[in-house]
């Protein structure tokens, strides 16, 4: 059964992540080997499996080589994000330190 309030909130989270893309090079490594800002999927406050679903939606539209950073407060994301990467063939880059109350997990998309 569909829940209009939850569906709207879920769509807002995806749109916010899409809005964070900035220019076309954002989330990709620079040509000279430097790292650009990652594409952010803000899944704070969402419970399993929603952080991985948001990641999958963003990764689907991202070019190969895009670095995606998932922000999550659900402790299950620590296992879910690397498992999703293994199942889908993306590169799990690891957990990165944050100044907030959330964890951040980085993924590099592959073609």
Image (cartoon, rainbow, N blue to C red):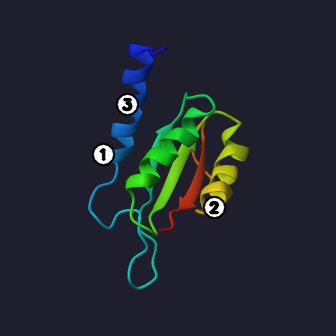
Q: Is residue 69 above or below residue 6?
A: below
Q: CA distance from mark 2 to mark 1?
A: 23 Å
Instruction: Report the side of 98 relative to 37 (left or right).
Output: right
Residue 72 versus residue 85 in the image, above or below: above
Instruction: Tell me what residue is drawn at x 26 percent, y 61 percent.
Output: 23
In terms of image quadrants, where is residue 61? bottom left
Q: Nearer the viewer, mark 2 or mark 1?
A: 2
What residue did someone put label 1 on? Answer: 19
- Mark 2 = which residue? 92
Q: Are marks 2 and 1 in contact (CB under 8 Å)?
A: no
Residue 40 in the image: x percent, y percent? 44, 49
Residue 26 picture location, percent across and down: 35, 63
Where residue 83 sits in the image (x, y, percent)?
70, 51
Corner quadrant of residue 46: top right
**Element on which disc 3 rests:** helix
In front of the other: 31 or 64: 64
The residue that disc 3 covers is 11
* Residue 95 falls in image quadrant: bottom right
Circle 2 — which element? Answer: strand
- The residue drawn where x is 38% and y is 15% is 4
């Amino acid at each position: 059964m569909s829940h209009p309030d939850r569906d709207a909130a879920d769509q807002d989270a995806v749109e916010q992540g899409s809005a964070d893309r900035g220019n076309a090079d954002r989330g990709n490594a620079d040509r000279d080997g430097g790292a650009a800002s990652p594409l952010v999927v803000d899944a704070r406050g969402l419970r399993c499996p929603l952080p991985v679903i948001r990641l999958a939606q963003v990764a689907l539209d991202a070019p190969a080589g895009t670095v995606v950073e998932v922000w999550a407060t659900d402790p299950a994301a620590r296992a879910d994000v690397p498992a999703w990467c293994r199942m889908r063939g993306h590169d799990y880059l690891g957990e990165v330190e944050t100044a907030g109350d959330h964890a951040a997990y980085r993924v590099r998309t592959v073609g």
